[in-house]
Image: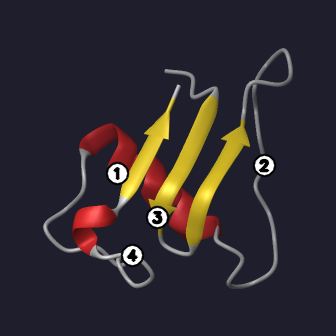
Amino acid sequence: MIIERLDLIAHGRFNQVSLDLSAGPRRFHIVYGANESGKSTTLRAIGDLLFGYPTQSFDAYRFQYRDLRVGGV
């Protein structure tokens, strides 16, 4: 499965953020950044996109649980 775009509509600290992952012939991406920049939140968003939200979420602190949204292509 190839994820070309990840839309963090309302997830964790992110609001209306899209990550374009379609560039490159092999589509291999390394994600890095400072502590508390959202790397783990983004990884959980991919899991939530593929498998659905768990009954409780660490990412429901800025938005209420019922308002959490993530999308992708």
State which quadrant residue 4 falls in: top right
> In the drawing, what numbered circle is on residue 48?
1
User: Which sits earlier in the primary sequence, circle 4 or circle 3?
Assistant: 3
Asked whether disc 1 touches disc 2, contact meaning CB atoms under 8 Å apart, the reply is no
For the residue labelled by badge 4, is the local secondary structure a helix, a strand or a loop?
loop
> What distance separates the C-alpha of mark 2 from that of mark 4?
28 Å
Q: Which mark is residue 63?
A: 4
| Kind of residue at disc 1 | Asp
CA distance separating discs 1 and 2: 20 Å
Neighbour tally class for label 1: few under 14, some 14-19, many 20 plus, Cα within 10 Å: some
Residue at label 3?
Answer: 11
In the rendered image, the residue lying farthest to the top is 25
Which tag is nearer the camera, tag 3 or tag 2? 3
User: Which of the 4 image quadrants contains residue 15?
Assistant: bottom right
Q: Which residue is mark 2?
A: 30
User: Percent position (x, y) of residue 70?
Assistant: 43, 48
User: Disc 4 residue type?
Assistant: Phe
